[in-house]
Amino acid sequence: MSDTSKPAQGFRLDALMPGEGQIHRLSALATLLLLVAGFSIASPAFFSVNNALTVLLQTSVIGLLGIGMTMVILTGGIDLSVGSVLALSGVVSGLAVKAGVPVAPGMALGIVTGAACGAFNGFVITKLRITPFVATLGMMLIARGLALQVTGAVPVSGLGEGFGTLGNGAPFRIVHMKPNGFPQVLFPGIPYPAILLLVMAVAGAYLLRRRQLGRHIYATGSNEEAARLSGVRVDRVKLYAYTITGALAGLAGNVLMSRLVTAQPSEGMLSELDAIAAAVIGGASLMGGVGTISGTMIGAFIIGTLRNGLNMAGVSAFIQQIMIGLVVIGAVWIDQMRNRR
Amino acid sequence: MSQPLVEMIDVEKHFGGVRAVDHVSLDLCAGEVVGVLGHNGAGKSCLMRMLSGAMVPSGGEIRIGGEAVQMTSPNDARDRGIETIYQTLALADHLDAPANLFLGRELKTRFGNLDDTRMLREARTVLARLNPNFKNLRDPVSSLSGGQRQVIAIARAIYFDTKILIMDEPTAALGPSETAMVADLIRQLRDEGIGIFLVSHDMHDVFDLCDRVVVMNKGRLVGAHRIDEVTKDDVLSLIIKGELPADWSARNLAPAL
Ligand SMILES: Nc1ncnc2c1ncn2[C@@H]1O[C@H](COP(=O)(O)OP(=O)(O)O)[C@@H](O)[C@H]1O
Ligand SMILES: [Mg+2]
């Protein structure tokens, strides 16, 4: 029994644990503000409404993936397939719309495809007892291969204006007609992707905090055997978590492809790493049982801001890759330090 | 005697070649405490886990209230009023005491949301009954002392409508006063008509609380006696050698020396 050693170790945690999650999120938030301040000084164009909207758009994809990733990480798992599932879902939607299906059901089909990929992940993990890392690595190849196969590796374009609404539309746009007949944009509107991200983040946080499934997601990641003995159906909990993650990846794929008004089978490469990094930077533990949606949102904005700011500052794509790589390692390192304490 | 609450008949559990539980038969009546003793690795926990629904037997039959049952998950056992305090406590470390207490059986509001307010209130009441000093209910249980963790595990078993209680070394992490409190609790639950299996290494507790003892050795049941038939030395001999002393006869029948 591990309890003989627990109390001593537990006592030190006693002083640290309760506020620790919040402290982590606060420091992440401070990092985000520092990044914004730094980039604003480095490049005046960074701190503008238009660029803020660009960051918001870029972050919405990372954020949607991050919400799902947080859930599977909370169960003690990981999902390496979200980038590929994003591409497959977007491609399915694109092909459906191209084939004449109206935009809304066409996109729904893509999201259902994502959910199906996620459910398959959950099935492989819970029924075939394959570790999440390997199972979702397999799905990463399967979904990417499918996306490339069905499109012949050629982007699907000519999808029509309707397909672009989700990614490019912005309700609450205020345009003032000037006397000379030219329109003046008083407020550029709030992009649909940003609204979608907010809605999904609130829904995700509600699920995790207020619903039984959310409680069971935390319990499963915290101590799977204890959860099982307490009557939690851990296999079903995991199946739900992976399915939700797949559906969110599908949604993110539709947002991204809609923004490009083209279904790109090679989109979303390595975006699973952005999502994992967002969750970990936001305080999620890869050991499971620890993490919040709000933390992941902050993490997503840190990554989105970092990418955008480095671009604006003229840092080369190669250097960017190096820096993001270091941030990912740093975030996981911090996670491990936290667990070792 | 009335219908036993639990009858385990010829129950077996194998892991590959290891016979963790080997043709064990055992019963338990209402309002009775049965001690389950044996060395580490004798198979006590496996036997109890089969009754908890946490482990599926390789063979044999389990009857609850006279009815043969197939329990494949802990929920099956809980639905029949069987509650278990596991040796490992089975707590989710990152959750707080109320969340652990109600894990798998969360209280909900009308809209199906978690009713954390009510769970906290109920947890406060039941935990106070076991340990009046239990105040830090909102802390993750990983930060609590071994005794407090044990109290949560015990509270979880007695809060719900329990008919059969399995306690796998419930006092292992407790100090003397908490151990005494658990002993009082066991008597109280027994008087309410609950049948209790008490797995313990503490000979004093066993002789103090149990009506009967059963002893396991290498997966087999090597002795089942009323507590007044045996002495501590007899039980020790069963645990260590797997048999009673050569000159044994039921102590309560023998003339006092
Ligand atoms: N899940 C398992 N897989 C394989 N062997 C097990 C498992 N659980 C218990 N055992 C073995 O079964 C035997 C009995 O264990 P256990 O019931 O825990 O003993 P006790 O509780 O009496 O100390 C031991 O030899 C143990 O190694
Ligand atoms: Mg044991």
Image: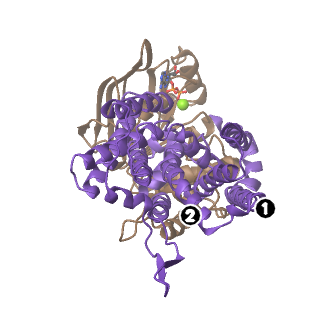
Chain colours: A purple, B brown
Left or right: residue B189 versus residue B231 is left
Q: Residues within 10 Å of mark 1 (few under 14, many from 20)?
A: few
Numbered label attached to residue B198? none
Inter-mark Cα distance, 1 to 2: 18 Å
**Residue placed at 55% from the left, 17% from the top?**
B245
- Residue B28 in percent (x, y) is at 37, 39
Residue A210 vs residue B204, the one in the foreground: A210
Nearest the camera: A197 or B75? A197
Q: Quadrant of ligand 2?
A: top right
Residue A171 figure quarter: bottom left
- Residue lying furthest bottom in this view? A179
Look at the numbered disc 1 and say if its residue's Cβ is closer than 8 Å to ligand 1. no
The answer, for residue B77, to whether it is visible in the render is: no
* Depth order, front residue of A121/B57: A121
Q: Is residue A157 shown above or below A126? A: below
Q: A27 or A220: nearer the eye?
A: A27
Asked if residue B242 is positioned above or below residue B32 in the image, the reply reads above
In the rendered view, does A297 fall on the left or right side of B84?
A: right
Looking at the rendered structure, whether the residues under marks 1 and 2 are on a common chain is answered as yes
Q: Amino acid at mark 1?
A: Ile
| Residue on which disc 1 sits | A41
Q: Amino acid at mark 2?
A: Leu
Report helix, strand or loop for mark 2.
helix
Disc on the earlier residue, 1 or 2: 1
In the picture, which quadrant includes the N terminus of chain A? top right
Residue B49 picture location, percent across and down: 43, 34
Q: Is residue A138 above or below residue A259?
A: above
Can you identify the residue that label 2 sits on? A53
